[in-house]
Amino acid sequence: MKRVVVVHGPNLNLLGKREPHIYGTRSLDDLNQTVRDKAGKLGLEVTVFQSNHEGEIIDFLQKEAPGSAGIVINPGALSHYSLALYDCLQALALPVVEVHLSNIHAREEFRSKSVTARAARGVITGLGFAGYELALEFLAKQE
């Protein structure tokens, strides 16, 4: 069975509480259940992780991602400045799909630039939880 690693970055633990007019009222637990349900339908094993700390995310990826079929990552604010996370994703040499719940291009100017996106096969932005499901579908089809 293919395994996919799903990583949620800083402040995603506040889903449902933080800016519900942007991110909605569903929680991170709700999102993780959506991810697990979709992975199950696709015949994927999924490992899910969330941290507010850049180094913890990098350590997790270096330990858990090798041998997986790919990575779904919502780096949150780290996407806008973390060269260390970009370097990690590049070094792992796995298919990466970057996901953002909100449309980062329709928000503040600084949010429209993602340094981590250069390490990704694709970026899905603005589709809410469905973005994660689409990312899983893509990775399930990769050889």
Image (tube, grey):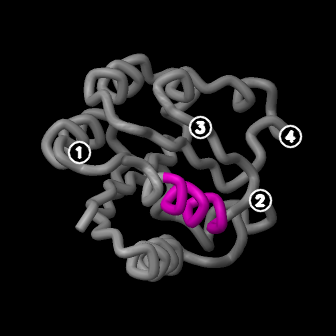
The residues bearing labels 1 and 2 have C-alpha atoms spaced at a distance of 30 Å
- Of the numbered discs 1 and 2, the one sitting upstream in the chain is 2
Q: Nearer the viewer, residue 69 or 48?
A: 69
The residues bearing labels 4 and 3 have C-alpha atoms spaced at a distance of 18 Å
Q: Residue at x 54, y 75 (%)?
A: 27
Quarter of the rendering containing residue 96: top left
Disc 2 target residue: 22
Which structural element holds mark 1?
Answer: loop
- Of the numbered discs 2 and 4, the one sitting upstream in the chain is 2
* Residue 65's disc number: 1
Q: Give the range drawn in magenta.
A: 129-138
Q: Residue at x 46, y 25 (%)?
A: 119
- Of the numbered discs 1 and 3, the one sitting upstream in the chain is 1
- The x, y position of residue 43, in whole percent, is 36, 75
Q: Residue at x 56, y 61 (%)?
A: 132
User: What amino acid type is highlighted by mark number 4?
Assistant: Ala
Q: Is the magenta stretch mostly helix, strand or loop?
A: helix
Which structural element holds mark 4?
Answer: helix
Disc 4 target residue: 106
- Of the numbered discs 1 and 4, the one sitting upstream in the chain is 1
User: What amino acid type is highlighted by mark number 2?
Assistant: Ile
Kindly report which numbered mark, 2 or 4, lies closer to the viewer in this rendering: 4
- The x, y position of residue 70, in whole percent, is 35, 47
The N terminus, quarter of image = bottom left
Label 4 environment density (alpha carbons within 10 Å; few <14, some 14–19, many ≥20) = few
> Are circles 2 and 4 on residues that touch, CB within 8 Å?
no
User: What amino acid type is highlighted by mark number 3?
Assistant: Gly
* Residue 16's disc number: none
- The x, y position of residue 64, in whole percent, is 18, 48
* Residue 122's disc number: 3
Label 3 environment density (alpha carbons within 10 Å; few <14, some 14–19, many ≥20) = some
Kindly report which numbered mark, 1 or 4, lies closer to the viewer in this rendering: 1
